[in-house]
Image (tube, helix red, strand yellow):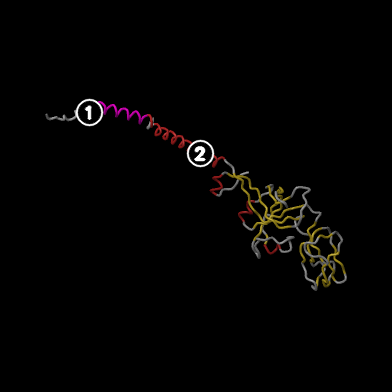
Amino acid sequence: MSTVIEPETAASSGPSAKEQSQAAVAAARAAAVLEPGLDQPVRLVGARLWLAGAALLLAVGAGGGWAVWGRLPHTLTVHAVAAHGEAPVRVAAERAGSLVEFKVRPGEKVTAGQVLALVGDAEATAPTAGTVTALLAAPGAQLNLGSPLLTLDPAGAPATVRLLVDDPKDAARLKPALPVLVPAPGGGAIHAVVERVEPLPVRADSLDGALPVAVPGLPSGAAPVWVAYARLPQGVALNGPLALDVRVDLGSRHPYQAVLGQEAKR
């Protein structure tokens, strides 16, 4: 007797269409559980981008307001000499004769009446206490009555700062009453005030012997130099005379003025 093996039915050969549909729905739900709200991050990113854009606009607006209403300090750096009085005291020969020798040298502090030099057999003495700043003759030179011997920085005169400017545009910015920041030994600054500005420049070579110390950076020869004087606070003691750079406070200006090169307003 023979045995016939029947083929499997469609139901046993694979899932039905209904089962496939249910599986697809389940898979979709699973995906929804694993990655909920796939469109939500897109909306969040959009919101964050909008907020970032708004913040940027606010920042730019604030920056624009600062550029218009903000203030920046504006100063001018100037070569200067800190000394006493407006000019050194010149000591002259009180009689004609040969300069035998100097008894002092530049930078030396002297007292009133101290012997400074010998002219012939006569002594030239200090008219005031101070610091020797320059020797104006050479030993062996034949001097006339009144010939300059040396200069002194007078210790008893008010402490002053002589501002020396060789740029006409910078000179035009100097005005009386402007604050001046003078560097102090050991750091910090002393506040001085511009008291007077000479209306006309002088020749650079005319300052030879008129300044108590050499000032690096100044021009030479016939180049024009404008001179202004600043007053130091009463009671300030100078360890000088000395050359230094000071900062003149020109006031403040808006950032857009600094970019455009416009002057400061006080």
Which stretch did the figure color magenta?
A: 18-32
Residue drawn 81% across the image and 66% down it: 146
Q: Is residue 179 above or below residue 30?
A: below
233 or 237, which is in the foreground?
237
Q: Main secondary structure of the magenta part?
A: helix
Judge from the rendering whether residue 21 lies leftward or rightward of residue 74; answer left or right.
left
The quadrant of the rendering that contains the N terminus is top left
Residue 38, compared with residue 239, is above or below; it is above
Q: Nearer the viewer, residue 57 or 1?
A: 1
Residue at mark 1: 12
Q: Residue at x 34, y 28 (%)?
A: 29
Q: Which residue is mark 2?
A: 59
> What residue occupies the far front of the structure in this picture?
1
Q: Is residue 24 magenta?
A: yes
Mark 1 residue type: Ser
Secondary structure of the residue carrying numbered label 2: helix
Residue 237: x percent and y percent?
A: 78, 51
Q: Position of residue 15 (x, y in %)?
A: 24, 29
